[in-house]
Amino acid sequence: MSITNIKSAGGIFLQSASPVMASPIGFAADVAQAINLGKDVRTGMENAGIYESRASVVRRAPVIAFGTTQLKTYFDLVGPWWRCVNSDGSHPGLDAYQLAHDRCNARDLTLSDRYRVANGLIVSDSLSVSHQGRAEIGGTVYTVTDGSGNEPIVKATSITYPNTAVDTEEYGLYQCTVGGDLLTGLKGLAIDFGVEVTQEDADGSIWPEWLSVGSIITRIRLSGVNPGWLDASIIPIAGKLVQHADTVLRLVKYKNGESYDTLASAIHIGITVHGLGCITTPAASSGRGVSNTEAMIYALHDGTNVPLSIDTTFALA
């Protein structure tokens, strides 16, 4: 017997009904994709038995976890934190594809598996990038049943892959300014978007019936090799209020066949932040290694603006 059904991650496509999307927009899940149906199983055994003899599924909350390097397409589609997924007769919602491997060849795009989510939320989980690396964003698609109690995720097989998912975007870590000061010696940036999703179901349903964003608690970690970040004029020991006008996290777009794309072109990514900047670790080393420094920004709403503002048409020079 030979293995005949091998699949790997394809793209994720969104075409929601509200606001209306005229055509689907997709991005490659080129870092990771995992479709988890979730389970809550009740088991039991007979009074005189030693083995379980009963099992029933009482709840299922499917999610799709993904990772992608296609930051511009993702942020233009979803925004910093989340976006609703909804559907009607001509707008299917969200589709996640698994691509078929053709034996001894490459991919057979006519035999894809498609996992369709008609209603739910796309949520940003984290963004990470290191010096000379490529930025990746991880997220989760949460599903919810419709008003008729239908399954929140539906699998279809032998589907032709659209093959229009964006897969040409790569960004690296560039200079970051915090509180008006350039943090030299920067080696890493990590954002925990901190989106808490609330789910509810009742009345005997085994599916989530209601989804909502409960809270957003965003943390930004900057790491480097410069203990001088802890300074009364940069980030004092008591912390420092940082604002959108003086705090910019920059991601530079790579150019295929070269290095960075033109710095003066409005094709890079700039993230402005409002919040409290603190040094968490001024210096930490092991043996004869170089000391590492870490700073944290506690992103805050300033009374008018959201804590993060992401510009995907940002010029670096």
Image (tube, rainbow, N blue to C red):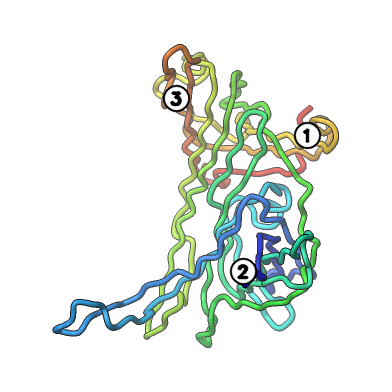
Q: Which of the two discs, 1 and 2, labels the residue nearer the N terminus?
A: 2
Q: Which mark is residue 204?
A: none
* Label 3 packing within 10 angstroms: few (<14), some (14-19), many (20+): many
SS at mark 2 in the image: strand
Q: Which of the two discs, 3 and 2, labels the residue nearer the N terminus?
A: 2
Which residue appears at 56% of the width and 26% of the height?
179
Q: Which residue is mark 2?
A: 85
In this view, the residue in front, 138 or 34, is 34
User: Could you tell me how far apart the alpha carbons at marks 3 and 2 are, in whole angstroms?
Assistant: 38 Å
* Label 1 packing within 10 angstroms: few (<14), some (14-19), many (20+): some
SS at mark 3 in the image: strand
**Whole-percent x and y of residue 15?**
71, 69
| Vertical placement of residue 266 versus 116, above or below | above
| Vertical placement of residue 206 versus 186, above or below | below
Q: Which residue is mark 3?
A: 279
In this view, the residue in front, 156 or 250, is 156
Q: Which residue is mark 1?
A: 315
**Whole-percent x and y of residue 120?**
56, 69
